[in-house]
Image: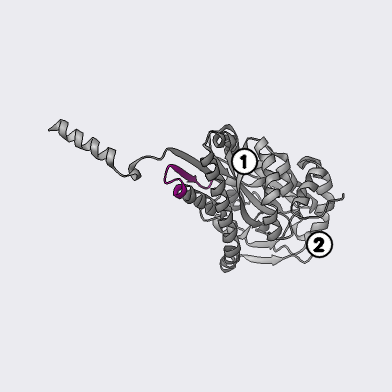
Amino acid sequence: MVRFFLFLMTAFLLSAPSVWAAPKTVLKIALGDPEGSEMGIVGEMFKKYVAEKSNGEIEVQTFYSGSLGDETETIHNVRRGTLALSCVGIANTVPFVKQLGILNLPYLFENLDEVVKATNGKSAEILNTYAEKAGFRVLAWTYTGFRYISNSKRPITKMADIKGLKIRVPQSTVLLATYKAWDASPVFIPWSETFVALQDGVVDGQCYGYIGFRAMKFQKARQKYITEVHHVYQLQPLIMSERVFQKMTPEQRQLMIDAGKAAQEAVLAYQKEESAKAKEDLIEAGVKISMLEDESVWKKTAMEEVWPKLADFVGGKDTINAYLASFGKPEWKP
């Protein structure tokens, strides 16, 4: 009877639907922001698309809020091939790929339409060529809005108002130079430590889009004021380990590329729909929103002081102009 019972159990397990079987491949994605953010849209859409199109043979697991380490650490792991994917702020890729620092140049983009052009087609190919040399490829670009400046001290409506304010910035030589050009005091703080640094008054402010601000609940970290400054559009690439990618079958590689496109389209739609709602939510929460009276001065100062100073840092004038030409911008003439 025991043998007969074991035989029946074995037969049942062998004949059970495939849903009982473990996926053949598991891919982990590290994401720095919480799930209720643009990164969350990218992560969940990528996960859903892969599960559906692979018939469950590939499982994507998402890990939010830096739970697999800070973004620099996850980029290292992606390059080594010990982590399949990570969604990171563009500034954190620059130590590995200096040319991606172009995307942090102040006032590179005028509006979202330019950003979309600059992250698709020939422009995307140029950026991916740089990335692949560092051991990863960009599968999707996460659109998270312009990096509006928030702070706990006062409204900022003109450039003189930011003087002396300690502003948290990511690991970006370009952004550090930009804030210094405006007479602010930029401080590099890892993203995972930013909320506490704002709460404890280590820094006065930070810069991020409305949806990300809401997801991080920065209004609870003494951030009373936001100013719409259009100096940098925050792009967060979903990167995949080239080592992992090359071990896949041609069909699996195409699936990764297609899933990235689906995630990028989803987050673009989300950004367009949700950004205004996030702004309204923050106003209801008591955050005061200001517009600049003199943004032309901010732009002129940044482009005259930062672009010439850091052109070589991001690959040189020819690299900058090749990228500008790829999405229809005029040549930069220092």
Residue 15 in which image quadrant: top left
- Counting from the top left corner in percent of width and height, residue 109 is at 73, 56
What is the x, y in percent for residue 246? Answer: 56, 34
The residue under label 2 is which amino acid type?
Ser
Residue at the spot 72% in from the left edge and 44% down from the top edge: 101
Q: Give the residue pinned by disc 1.
A: 137
User: Which residue sits furthest right?
Assistant: 334
Residue 207: within the magenta?
no
Say if the magenta span includes residue 66. Answer: yes
Which x, y percent locates residue 315? 77, 40
Q: Is residue 10 left or right of residue 139?
A: left
- Front-lying residue, 305 or 156: 305
Q: Quadrant of the N terminus?
A: top left
Residue occupying the far left of the picture? 1
Q: Which mark is residue 314?
A: none
Residue at x 77%, y 55% (from the top left corner): 328
Q: Secondary structure at mark 2?
A: helix
Location of residue 285 in the rendering, given as x and y in whole percent from the top left corner: 56, 66
Q: Nearer the viewer, residue 258 or 212?
A: 258
Quick check: can you spot residue 38?
Answer: yes
| Residue at left offset 34%, top offset 43% | 18
- The amino acid type of the residue labelled 1 equals Arg
Q: Spot the residue most to the front.
A: 250
For residue 150, side relative to residue 107 (left or right): left
- In the image, 161: left or right of 142? right
**Residue that carries the numbered disc 2 in the rendered image:** 296
SS at badge 1:
strand
Name which residue lies at 55% across and 44% down: 254
Graded by Cα atoms within 10 Å as few (under 14), some (14 to 19) or many (20 or more), the crowding at tag 2 reads few
Magenta stretch bounds? 51-67
